[in-house]
Amino acid sequence: MTMKHLALLVPNTDTTLETDLRCGLPADWTYHSSRMHLDEVGEQAERDMVDKELPKGLASFRGIIPFSAAVFGCTSASAVYGRKGAQQLKETMQESLHCPAASAFSCVEEAIYGAGNPPMAFLSPYIDSVNTFFAGTLREFGIHPVCYQGMGIVQDPEIAAIAPEQTLSFVRSQKEKIHQAGAKLVFLSCTNWRVYEQKAALEAILELPVITSNSCILDWIRSLDGQAPQANEPPVPASR
């Protein structure tokens, strides 16, 4: 079997995306990570990651192996410079590594438009200021968030440590608000949040379709092989 190689640029504090990729990637794909320093989840720290850490990460990949695809694995940072910056980020990766490239945000955008761009709710682990900024970014891309709520966490390692039961409780607490707002789709944002493995359970609680940052990344990778998005519950890792 000929292997396909994914260049993954991921915040140094993110310990979830790689685990989800290991569980969800097709058998003929493997990934290789370059870690980008991230002080905390916030607008300025994310701008610094794009401006300073992305070039270093791309440089670390050059000349190693022909990559089949590249992914910038941070949702909010992907679009921290708006529509023009998001497009420039993808082009920079493509030109540097000579392969198709996507960001976590572009994968999410593709999934939302693929669902018909319905009124949507988004949930996150983030603080209010990050959620408000991200809601504005979604609107700039023509996406319609009708409500949103975060868990108030700033430090990325604390996001990875959120217990699945805590996430389910938080989502249950938002169900009425989401339905009253008229949402037809729910997006759970953050590549470091353990929600990919809970996707089916979340859909059962909310009684609505659910997408996550990592499910959208995996669907984009599958699309490169002409595969349809994954419909069933993703495999649960043996341990975390």
Image: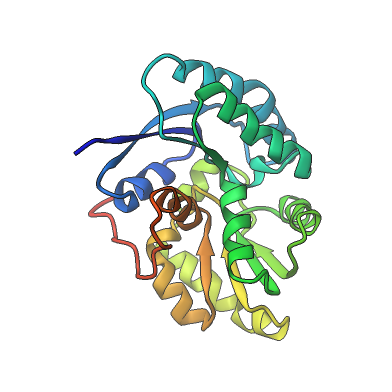
Give residue 93's position: percent from left, percent from top.
57, 29
Q: Residue 178's image quarter?
A: bottom right
User: What residue appears at the point 63 percent right and 79 percent down from the top-left corner?
Assistant: 184
Q: In this view, does 114 lie above or below 35?
A: below
Q: Is residue 50 visible?
A: yes
Give residue 108's position: percent from left, percent from top.
59, 55
Image position of 194 (left or right of 177): left
Looking at the image, the residue that sits furthest to the front is: 226
Front-most of residues 167 and 87: 87
Q: Is residue 189 visible?
A: no
User: What residue appears at the point 62 percent right and 36 percent down from the top-left corner?
Assistant: 90
User: What residue appears at the point 73 percent right and 53 percent down from the top-left corner?
Assistant: 134
Q: Is residue 122 above or below residue 2?
A: below
Front-most of residues 34 and 66: 66
Q: Is residue 207 above or below residue 62?
A: below
Q: Residue 135's image quarter?
A: bottom right
